[in-house]
Image: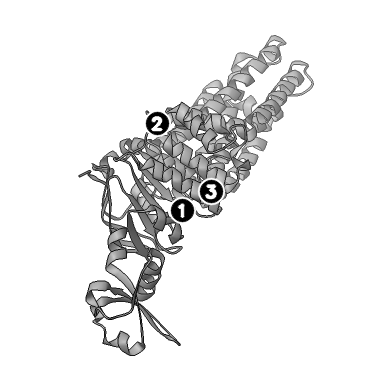
Amino acid sequence: MKCLYVKELWQMRTNGLVYGGLAGLIMLITGAALAALGIADGFFLSWPVFLMAGVAPFADLNDDFKSRWSDLVRTLPARRSDEVGAKYLIALTILGAVSLVYIISRIPVIAAGGMDMGELFKRLALLMSMGSFAPALPLPLAYRWGDRGLKAAYIVTMVLMGMFGGFYSTDSVHDKMSGAGAAVMLGTFAALFGLSWVISARCINKYDR
Amino acid sequence: MAENAIEIRGVTKRYKDFCLDNVDLTLPGGCILGLIGENGAGKSTLIKVLLGIIHKNAGSVKILGRDADRELSDIKEDIGVVLDEVGIPDGFRAKHINNVMKLAYRNWDEKQFYDDLEKFKIPTNKKFKEFSRGMKMKMGIAIALSHKAKLLVLDEATNGLDPVIRDEVTDIFNDFTREEDHSILISSHIVSDLEKLCDYVSFIHHGRVLLNEEKDVLLEEYAICHCSEEQLASLDPAAVKGRKVGRYGAQALVLRDKVPADMNLSPVNIEELFVFMIKEAD
């Protein structure tokens, strides 16, 4: 599993994660600056970053199919479920890193009185639910139907994410949502992510691509 | 006598439009087996089943004396694999490959990997996508040789290489089998590559193995008979394994000891043997 996880990290790096990460960082900081100065709510600059983070693992999987790593990996001394595990772990790693940057970028906003901790949690819950949902749908389809499944899932996911993003961007959603509601939402999406992992592991063990 | 490196018994893999049908195959330890078949014959499917890349519908596989159904993940420590597409991500350089593989294999030998890259003249600072096909293949071979594998499985690894590189690669494989417990299964549709290299040959056609035999035995047992159509018709049908009739006479692949001694026979090579047998099977 460790070797496959390291491969994912290297692949993210060689696929331009540095530039993508830099762009994401600039967007989060700009959003935070706008919010701290009271010019605008920076949320509209945050959700695309979480969307990109969520999409990264299955863009990576698409590259696996293209390069035929998806065949080579099965010649290594690893179980098929490790292949899946590495992909979900990298998804969590990216989401964790982006969430951490988001929290840090909001410290000045909180200090300036533009946001309290409860608000930060609600917004982070919305963003993390989006970031975790993005890979949760396509990965099982890709492990069941290969690159054909991945392409179909990619289109569906992008449409859904666009809709979610627009929905989440409206102030009324996080204004009306309670802290408990946000926690339930985050828990539900975490459970969906876990379920997706289990289904992917079953698919990869049972079916050939 | 060394144990068999590979024992495949009754392996079946069914697709909608293709079936690998009840395949038996044996690679004795310390030997090189050439799996020969035309495009789409089932070579890659058989290798994928062998390595667990795809599931089989029936049959059993033993690798290096161990049951592949139960211990495949562990057995793979001892198998070096080069597929027709090597499978390294495009943006990877040698250091990335080394970093991943040293975590994948218990016996990964970093020094040997870099020594092989130098020996094969593979640049370590170039991205994999910038390599020529020959360099990609040699990178695949360097990976396969760097974890003290006892068995190499090579799927169409020499296809598309220029003659000089094919010759270099052949030397590498010959060096590998100097160790008496090292074996190679190599598939190709380029028969001349395998003829030089192999101790055993196996013909696969439409998903069925037509023969699996020692090369020298085949070359001794079979011959090409040059005769007229009438003479061909008079031969024992059991002696004739393939035929080609033209304007100027007939040629037949025959079993030497089943045809009269006065027949005009010439030695057969593996390519002729393959072509005659495939045409006869059709």
Give me the C-alpha separation between circle 3 and circle 1.
14 Å
- Looking at the picture, tell me which residue is in the foreground, B131 or A107: B131
Q: Are marks 3 and 2 in contact (CB under 8 Å)?
A: no
Reading the chain from its start, which is encountered first: label 3 or label 1?
Answer: 1
Q: Quadrant of the N terminus of chain B?
A: top left
Assign a secondary structure to mark 1: loop
Q: Residue at x 39, y 37 (%)?
A: A81
Q: Amino acid under label 1?
A: Glu
Task: Say which quarter of the image contains residue B276.
Answer: bottom left
Q: Quadrant of the C terminus of chain B?
A: bottom left
Give me the C-alpha separation between circle 3 and circle 2.
27 Å
Assign a secondary structure to mark 3: helix
Q: Amino acid under label 3?
A: Ile
Tell me residue A31's x, y (percent): 72, 23
Q: Residue furthest front?
A: B262
Q: Are marks 2 and 1 on the same chain?
A: yes
- Looking at the picture, tell me which residue is in the foreground, B215 or A56: B215
Reading the chain from its start, which is encountered first: label 3 or label 2?
Answer: 2
Q: Residue at x 29, y 40 (%)?
A: B181
Tell me residue A70's x, y (percent): 48, 44
- Where is mark 2, residue-wise? B105
Give me the C-alpha separation between circle 2 and circle 1.
24 Å
Classed neighbour count for the residue bearing mark 2: other residues with Cα under 10 Å, few (<14), some (14–19), many (≥20): many
